[in-house]
Image (spheres, grey):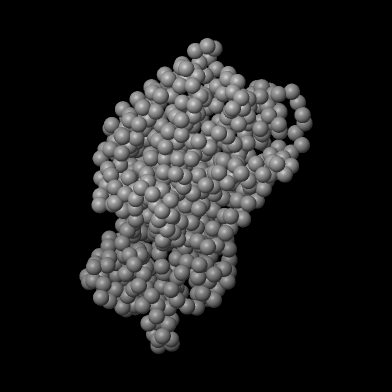
Amino acid sequence: MSHEGHPNQFALLGQRRFAPFFWTQFLGAANDNVFKFAFTLMITYQLQLEWLPAKMAGLVIGALFILPYVLFSATSGQLADKHDKARLMQLVKSLEIAIMAIAAWGFHTANVPALLACVFLMGLHSTLFGPVKYAYLPQQLSERELTGGNGMVEMGTFVAILLGQLLGGILVDTPVVGPQHVAWACLALAVLGRVTAQAIPASPSTDPNLVINWNPVTETWRNLKLAHEGVAVFRSLLGISWMWFFGAVFLSNFPAFAKEVLHGSPQVASLLLAVFSVGIGIGSLLCEMLSKRHVEIGLVPLGAIGMSVFAIDLYFAATGLPAAEPYTVGAFLAVPAHWRVLADLTLLALFAGVYSVPMYALIQLRAQPTHRARIIAANNILNALFMIASSVIAGAMLGAGLSIPQIFLAVGIANAVVAAYIFLIVPEYLLRFVAFILTRLVYRFRIVNDERIPTTGPAVLVCNHVSFVDAVLLMAASPRPIRFLMDHQIFKLPVLGWMFKLAKAIPIAPAKADPATYEAAFTAARAVLADGEMVCIFPEGGITRDGTLQPFKGGVMKLVEGLPDVPVIPMALGNLWGSYFSRVEGGHAMVKPMRRGVWSRVDLTVGPPAPAAAVSPEALRTSVQGLLAGSAA
């Protein structure tokens, strides 16, 4: 579907390939939270149980719900890869009806052991649904839709969590008949979820011959090894798990934070949850707009920076608030200092959404389709372990005498350290962030025909060479990494040279000056193509000194030698000559920062691909010249 024909992520809600799936997921998340929150409140306020004290109820219910993620994620990932995902979702939603029927009986009879069993079973239901959910999206959505689709799912999930907890709290608090109302609501939501699941279109198996390994220990280890095969994918799994660690620290401490630090009523704790959920939802939806409908992992460092900044500021905002009688929501909002607390919570949640959505999309895009669900299962296992660790560590910090604001401060600082570590060992995040800043704040970057850049398979990109940041601009245009053949001299430049080394650019020297480096460059580049990746070459052999397109050298033909079917894609950078990073004024670049003002327009026009056997340097130069003429028109 074209960009013009599919205006934004909300249009997906009008399409069968997405809407029934979205509402099935939404209703399931809502039901989880109606059930868990109502049950927690029922034990806390209505039942007096010696064997389950009220203060332990939330911890026990949370632990029972997350336990299946550790035990059964590996198995659920295999099932999702082996079977049709639509059919599997329908079966899982049928299971939900059965679980909620038992829960309805448990609410009617106040049978706590039965309800605890249902908590575990609903955790199993969510464990089975998770890998199917995230493996379904890349089968139904294109690369240009993945970020928006994931943003919608994340937004829907947090809205469902919020509405589910509010509904559960209201229903269970109804005098006398509260638990019965909860029972009927949970059963109704399960039935509605099964109805919407029936409309999910078929999503065929990606590995029908897979033999299920029912041993969760060995299969969990195998899933983690599968995930570890792709460095960027595995680091993204760790990054997402860290986000859940980060978020769990805040969510689990909201009740105590509201009561002990903000001196608020239980309704203030609900307000904090609402603000946090809205922030996550807004951040998730912003990703599509910020990424210009691509999988843009340059947003991840932006999200990490925001998470740390506002978590640290929350410590200062919440420190030294005077003691008071428990505030109602109205009285709480009437205190100006509390607005800073709410702003910090909203913004750190917003940036958490910006941080997580591109990582989910990247995993879906780059994981091998045959075991994509098992990679998602590995993610769920890691998420569960990180969330358990967050509870243990936060509990230990509280036990050591730290205040809740001090814990928030520690997590904010730790987030900065973890983010820096991830970005240094997987520099693609950092490079894409630099490209994101350059194309959003320094230039107004317009890409024409970006759908011609392939999302899978080998390709050779051929582009004119105008400035020292051409490679960074092309990085920003591509949904996946590009390996650049670049003049070995550019690696000696401060900052830019370091960046290109991080990007694993391939140094090349003139054949006459350094034949060994020349041959090694083409050997390395052909190996990249053989691995199914993209290589970019600037056939002019150097940055233009007068703004005109120079003759193309024969390096591109040497690159595709023996690879006649590899597509060669001409590209043209327009309106970049005369900018700070281009050579003007006697051949010097980077001498007048404001030479073109701020936010000047730069274009990248992508031409139609042609098989390597059908191209020549002269023909490619003519194509690039034509693209430049079109962009100047």
Please name the residue shown 37% across and 46% down the image: 75
Residue 523 image position (x, y, % from top left): 36, 78
Q: In terms of depth relative to the viewer, which is nearer, 444 or 507?
A: 507
Image coords of residue 532 (percent x, y): 33, 65
Taking the view exactly as shown, the residue that stands out farthest to the front is 51
Residue visible at 71% across and 31% down in the picture: 260
Q: Does residue 189 appear to the left or right of 174 in the view shown? A: left
The image quadrant of residue 56 is: top right
Looking at this view, name the residue that lies furthest to the bottom: 512
Seen as rendered, the residue at the extreme top is 176
Question: Can you give x and y, in whole percent of width and height, for residue 18 in the image?
Answer: 33, 38
> Of residues 587 and 540, which is closer to you in this image?
540
Would residue 15 be seen by someone viewing this image from the given angle?
Answer: no
Which residue in the rendered view is the most extreme toward the left?
Answer: 614
Left or right position of 503 against 414: left
- Seen from the viewer's position, the closer of residues 500 and 248 is 248
Please name the residue shown 65% across and 51% down the image: 413
Q: Is residue 93 above or below residue 133?
A: above
Q: Residue 408, percent across and down?
A: 66, 43
**Can see residue 554?**
yes
Badge count: 0
The residue shown at (37%, 55%) is: 367
Give the camera-side residue of 364 and 499.
364
Q: Locate residue 458: give its quadrant.
A: bottom left
Query: Which quarter of the rendered picture does the C terminus lie within?
Result: bottom left
Is 415 above or below relative to 523? above
Q: Is residue 105 above or below residue 405?
A: above
